[in-house]
Amino acid sequence: MTKIEDIQQQGKEQFDAAVTTASGFQKGIQEIAVAFSDYSRKSFDDGRAFTEKLAGAKSLDQAIEAQTVYARTAYETFVSESQKIGGLYVDLAKQAYKPFEDFTAKFVPDAR
């Protein structure tokens, strides 16, 4: 038979888990927003630098070289930042799921 104190304790634990998840979720969203902001700023700066270099090109070969370098670095930056931001989303999902995992572990016996 379940005691009232046990039910209250489980309710308190769930409330604490919800508060922890909410604060962790907020922190994760902020990290993602900062990563997007940093990437946007870097992309803008790289685009501005490319435009200046392209405007200063004295020949078609210099313009093509500037375009090639810009395209390669833009792609590499996109891939690396996408992986970083994707990792932040994965961490956020794991963190959000963790309290439910802990809660269900109390009720499901280990399959050993």
Image (spheres, rainbow, N blue to C red):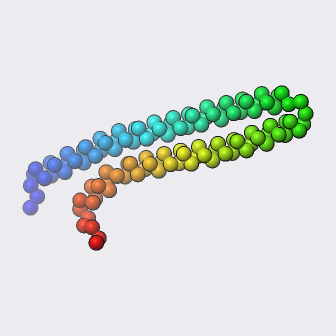
11 and 46: which one is in front? 46
Q: Residue at x 27, y 60 (%)?
A: 105
What quarter of the picture does the N terminus occupy? bottom left
Left/right placement of residue 2 relative to residue 69 reads: left
Q: Position of residue 13 (x, y in %)?
A: 22, 47
62 and 97: which one is in front? 62
Q: Residue at x 13, y 53 (%)?
A: 6
**Residue projecting furthest to the bottom:** 112
Left/right placement of residue 77 relative to residue 65 reads: left
**Residue projecting furthest to the right:** 59
Q: Quadrant of residue 55?
A: top right
As displayed, is residue 19 above or below residue 90?
Answer: above
Left/right placement of residue 45 relative to residue 99 reads: right
107 and 80: which one is in front? 80
Left/right placement of residue 3 relative to residue 83 reads: left
Q: Residue at x 45, y 39 (%)?
A: 29
As displayed, is residue 28 above or below residue 6?
Answer: above
As displayed, is residue 35 above or below residue 5?
Answer: above
Q: Position of residue 45 (x, y in %)?
A: 67, 30
What quarter of the picture does the C terminus occupy? bottom left
